[in-house]
Amino acid sequence: MATEFVARGADLELKGIRKEFPGFTAIEDLDLHIPAGEFFALLGPSGCGKTTTLRLVAGLDQPTKGQILIGGKDVTHTKAHERPVNTVFQSYALFPHMSVLENVAFGLKQRKIDDPMTKAQASLDLVELGHLALRRPAQLSGGQQQRVALARALVNRPSLLLLDEPLGALDLKLRRQMQIELKAIQMEVGLTFLHVTHDQEEAMDMADTVAVMNKGRIEQMGSPEKLYDRPKTVFVSKFLGQSNLFVGSVEEENASSISINVAGSKITVPKDRAEKHKGKIAVGVRPEKAFFHEEKPKLGAGHNLIGPGEIIDIRFTGVSNQYLIEIPKIGNVTVFAQNIGKSPVTELGAQVWVSWKVEHAFGLSDLPTNTGSETITESITVQ
Amino acid sequence: MAFAAFSHGGGGSKKSAAPVSKGSGKVALLLLLPGLFYLAVFFIAPLFSLIATSLQTMDISSGFPIYNYGFQVSNYIDVVSQYGPQIFRSFFYALLATIAALIISYPLAYFIGVKARRWPLLQGLMLTLVIAPFFISFLLRTFAWKQIFSNESWIVSGLQQIGLLSPDQYLVGTPFMVIFGLTYNFIPFMTLPLYTTLERLDVRYLEAGADLYASPRKTFMKVTLPLSMPGIVSGTLLTFIPIAGDYVNASGLFLGSTETSMLGNVVESKFLKSYEYPTASALSVILMGAILLLVTLYVRKSGTDDLL
Amino acid sequence: MKNFSLGKYALPVYAVLAFTYLLIPIAYTFVFSFNDYRRSNIAWRGFTFDNWTSVCEAQGVCEAFATSVSIGLISTVIATVLGTMIAIALVRYRFKFRSAVSLLLFLPMATPELVLGAGLAAQFFNVGAEMGFGTIVIAHVMFCLSFVVVTVKARVASLDPALEEAGRDLYAAPAQVFWKITFPLLLPGIMAAALLAFALSFDDFIITYFNSGPTETFPKYVYTAAAKGLPGEANVIGMSVFFLAIAIVVTVQVRSSLKAKRLAKIK
């Protein structure tokens, strides 16, 4: 039995997974491959199916349809306690009636591994809690409990470590610190990590690959940089950071780019940065990649320009100022300007034009639900 | 303090854990069946037995009574006409004793639950004192009251001397004594639920009441009392139900006499002394019916569906 | 000013009076357990330890006490096992007829003991069962069951299901999850339920009297003895049980309060 558990990470493959609960479908037709040794984040709002996915992988729930493979081996019908997978639970789920050391040794004892106490102690030392081994979980702080939960999972050397919003209950400062530690531990032990979270910053900060999940499906998957630079759907563009979206019909097309007409203004996007090249599409740009000008600038073909509009709101956030600009017939556009000494225009009511480089624009595969020339500037996550 | 955050965090997994997959339906059934079967055989079936027995006919042709299954509804009419006073006493005594228990318990529960909130250990010790009577046998404590108020006791002779009782008047055997005993014996059933509600009462409501120019009396009537309604409802039910069926306090052996006989005393003597099973059963069914009706009406009216 | 001080002291004074009232019969029973009584233990005849040193002297007291204890133990074990199973099923599983099951469990608690006792007796009489030790146990399990369910259910509900899932995740098979995680965590609730069941069983008279036949329990002994006068030895037994129960409750309270203080210190 014990030999089945490998010391290094294994890859995880989900094939056509579907999970139905009475009254609703939590996951519909999910395919996913996580290479061995990767730090993979499943990101999405609550109720998107990410925790259900994790529970299916852990074996705590059974999929309605589909296959789960760990290290190439089909474990779909393997019970939770027979899978080479360990979980760090959202509530940590430390056994309150056992000492910290007994908690960590629990999995080793169940598998009848030699010398469980020594190994558990070593694992506690790894997370720098060796001196608290004889305490009860209730006597530890939140951050310490989180580390015990991590040590309890890691000590088993699972092929795959599942993390269910493990930092959710910690305050911001502790969360940052734990993010760094977690990433360091993952690199040290080389295990495959599947991290479920609703915190986009956390996912982008730690993961090699991020999959954005929405309504039981994966909307887009890729490196954090790629997801941010080139979102493919409205949901991803809004869930990861903020976006200004413009909806219009494609009116011009050349070898490398297409242009849409938004209330008389021409907005161009490179073909290789657009999901669709025909019909009505949504084009977006990140607020920090847009600039505004007090006078109508003379810009080359490599730029998009809209306006004039009026500054209707200015927010000072420290590192940057956030401007909200209302452009007639087009809608509200957000622009972030870094505070690097000389600030641009700061008074409300000023008339400005907004521009950005064509290569910073991105074309989406779907349209915002409130279509028309209205732009989407609000985002789900703050900042 | 970090504790609150954890329990909060656990909420998510709790929700997703609730739907259980197919195989565990069998487990649930295996867990439930033995206990439910037990209640079906030894609780539900006896209630039907009781109804069946209450409708039996009596045959005395052979010299001693033999009961046969029948449908003699007239048993009920006989019982009500014959034991009307005892039935009435049961509910009347229960009503008075419940009211007395409420009046005695409320200030006590308020003191323990609200005023003593800052001292949990003291609170715990006072609660222990409240339930202390439960730890000594029900019959022993009732017997103790009988002795304390016995005809030879200095309390009775003292009352006779100051003229509250005439020289040939005694306490034991009077309705007063029975109601006194019933009140005493079931007070903890009243105090505990009252305490539970008052303990959770947010004192800031009271401060808000005072802040909004309500006098202490008004604050009590408009804020405290309505908020403690759930405790009052379950307390009065928990007290009234056992009192209405009690036959120890009203028994001639303890605090009562034949003048204070309640429904329970009739059932006891018919069942265990004169073996008139249909009569005893019919009286029990009447009690059960009345209690069920009362509970339903009471709970519906006060809107506290999830008590107990 | 006068009003203020009155309001401040009225409740504490009232509480002291109320506690005195609640404790009077207990004090009386305690005092008269030392009475050097002759035929009946009514008038004070002098102080003695005899009742305490030779409890079993009075005819039948110890036998009745022993019967009550063994009935209590057997009923408690059965009711606790059955009730715990139901409590776990109610909290952890979804099934049809859930509200019917809840009603079935609620009803015995809302039914007057008189009806429970008479109903069961009618049943035993109709099937021709012989009344005695066995029928008392059956009756006690029946009325203790719902109280066990209510007590254990609260404990199960407060148990985070993630703990059992963590056990499964850490290679524990279902049986091991139950014995190493679920059971130890439910134990305080189960113990409380068992104590409650024992107390209910030990002190029950109303239901027992209908279903006991010739078997004598301690409360039944007191009931029959009340006619001719209760021996001081009965007071001794009553007080011993009382002190034992108080000791258990106070120990539990002091321990949990100490634990809370210790935790508060660490935080």
Image (cartoon, coloured by chain):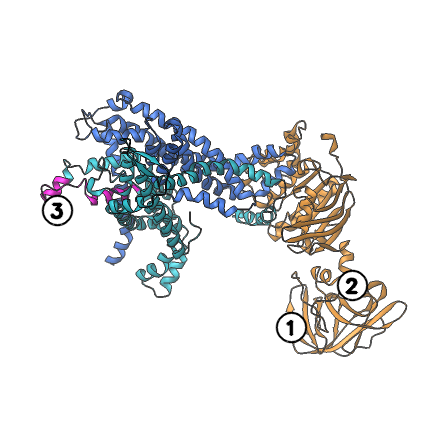
Q: Which mark is residue A192?
A: none
Which amino acid type is shown beneath numbered disc 1? Asp
Q: Residue furthest front?
A: B61
The residue wearing badge 1 is A313
What SS does tag 3 mark? loop
Q: Nearer the viewer, mark 1 or mark 2?
A: 2
Q: Residues within 10 Å of mark 1 (few under 14, many from 20)?
A: some
Residue B124 placement (x, y as % from top left): 38, 42
Q: Which residues are magenta?
A: B156-185
Q: Chain A shown in which color?
A: orange
Q: Is residue C173 above or below residue A268?
A: above
**Labels 1 and 2: the sequence-earlier one:** 1
Q: Separation of disc 1 and disc 2 at Cα?
A: 30 Å
Residue C93 or residue A99, whichever sits in front: C93
The residue wearing badge 2 is A365
* A47 lies left or right of C146: right
Chain coloured blue: which letter?
A: C
Residue A46 placement (x, y as % from top left): 64, 55
Residue shown at 29% from the left, 23% from the top: C60
* B77 lies left or right of C258: left
Residue C160 in sight: yes
The residue wearing badge 3 is B164
Q: Quadrant of residue A137?
A: top right
